[in-house]
Image (cartoon, rainbow, N blue to C red):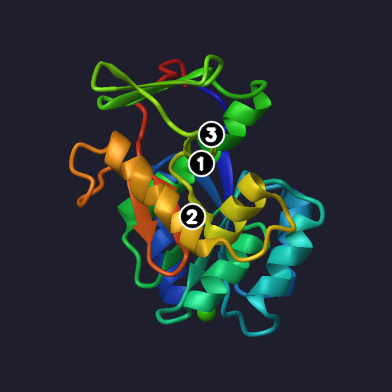
């Protein structure tokens, strides 16, 4: 039995903390709570949590500033909690280094799924990188051979389509903003590529999804970006 993962909640709404704490504890987390930004920053630096849940609407500081200050020294996954209707804030938070977001009100199962994805991602980086084969029941990508097989048949992807898919695999389960994708695929000075990106997403869906109009894997996160949704079967039974 390994040590419990420590999760820090920086959230000023007491009902949310009161509700989440026992739930997270029942999932084997040690929970730290802060209701203000400064307190959250202090706890983060003294306790080095494994995951941070950060509400962006805090009484004493702008949540985005808390995020930026955390990102100066920690790589721990940060999942931001945003109020309804603050779409711009989500994107800003993700572009400033948050790993994922949840809009309030959120579902606790969804929260747990995001936390699991974030922890798995960290684990993978620590273990020295990526698997060379990514496989779902519908498609398989051999990342070392750059080969894609869809329902048993080899499929040709253009270089941009392939790079986009490989990028999404690297962030599997996590949301990736348009800006992040454009920057990684076309480079930092490529400017506005939203239209091309939509086109490549469309093409990828045509090639990979069983029903491209109702994608199961390559999901659109409205006004934010895209998410490759696939939760691998537990690959680590010892954990
Ligand atoms: Ca709040």
Look at the picture and state if 100 lies above or below 123.
below
Instruction: Report how far apart the C-alphas of labels 2 and 3 lie in the structure.
Output: 13 Å
Q: Nearer the viewer, residue 161 or 28?
A: 161
Quarter of the image holding residue 58? bottom right
Residue at image mark 2: 197
The local secondary structure at tag 1 comes to: helix
Asked if one can make out residue 239 in the rendered structure from this viewpoint, the answer is yes
Residue at image mark 3: 159
Q: Are marks 1 and 2 in contact (CB under 8 Å)?
A: yes
Q: Nearer the viewer, residue 161 or 223?
A: 161
Residue at position x 60%, y 73% in the image: 35
Residue at position x 40%, y 42% in the image: 27
Residue at position x 53%, y 14% in the image: 145
Asked if one can make out residue 23 in the rendered structure from this viewpoint, the answer is no
Residue at image mark 1: 164
Label 1 or label 2, whichever comes before in sequence order: 1
The residue carrying mark 2 has its beta carbon less than 8 Å from ligand 1: no
Residue 80 in the figure: left or right of residue 156 = right
User: Residue 68 at x, y = what percent?
Assistant: 74, 65
């Amino acid at each position: 039995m390994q040590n419990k993962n420590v999760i820090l909640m920086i959230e000023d709404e007491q009902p949310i903390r009161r509700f989440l704490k026992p739930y997270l504890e029942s999932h084997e987390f040690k929970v730290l709570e802060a209701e203000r930004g400064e307190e959250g920053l202090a706890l983060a630096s003294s306790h080095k949590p494994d995951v941070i849940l950060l509400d962006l609407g805090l009484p004493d500081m702008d949540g985005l500033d808390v995020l930026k200050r955390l990102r100066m020294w920690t790589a721990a996954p940060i999942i931001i909690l945003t109020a309804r209707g603050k779409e711009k804030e989500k994107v800003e938070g993700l572009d400033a280094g948050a790993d994922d977001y949840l809009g309030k009100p959120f579902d606790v199962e969804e929260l747990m799924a995001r936390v699991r994805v974030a922890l798995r991602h960290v684990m993978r980086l620590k273990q020295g990188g990526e698997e060379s084969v990514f496989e779902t029941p519908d498609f398989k990508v051999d990342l070392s051979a750059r080969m894609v097989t869809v329902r048993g048949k080899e499929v040709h992807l253009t270089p941009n389509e392939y790079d986009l898919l490989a990028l999404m695999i690297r962030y599997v389960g996590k949301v990736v903003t348009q800006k992040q994708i454009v920057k990684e695929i076309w480079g930092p000075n490529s400017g506005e590529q939203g239209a091309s990106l939509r086109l490549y997403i469309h093409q990828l869906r045509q090639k990979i999804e069983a029903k491209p109009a109702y994608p199961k894997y390559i999901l659109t996160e409205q006004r934010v970006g895209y998410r490759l949704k696939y939760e691998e079967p537990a690959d680590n039974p010892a954990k």
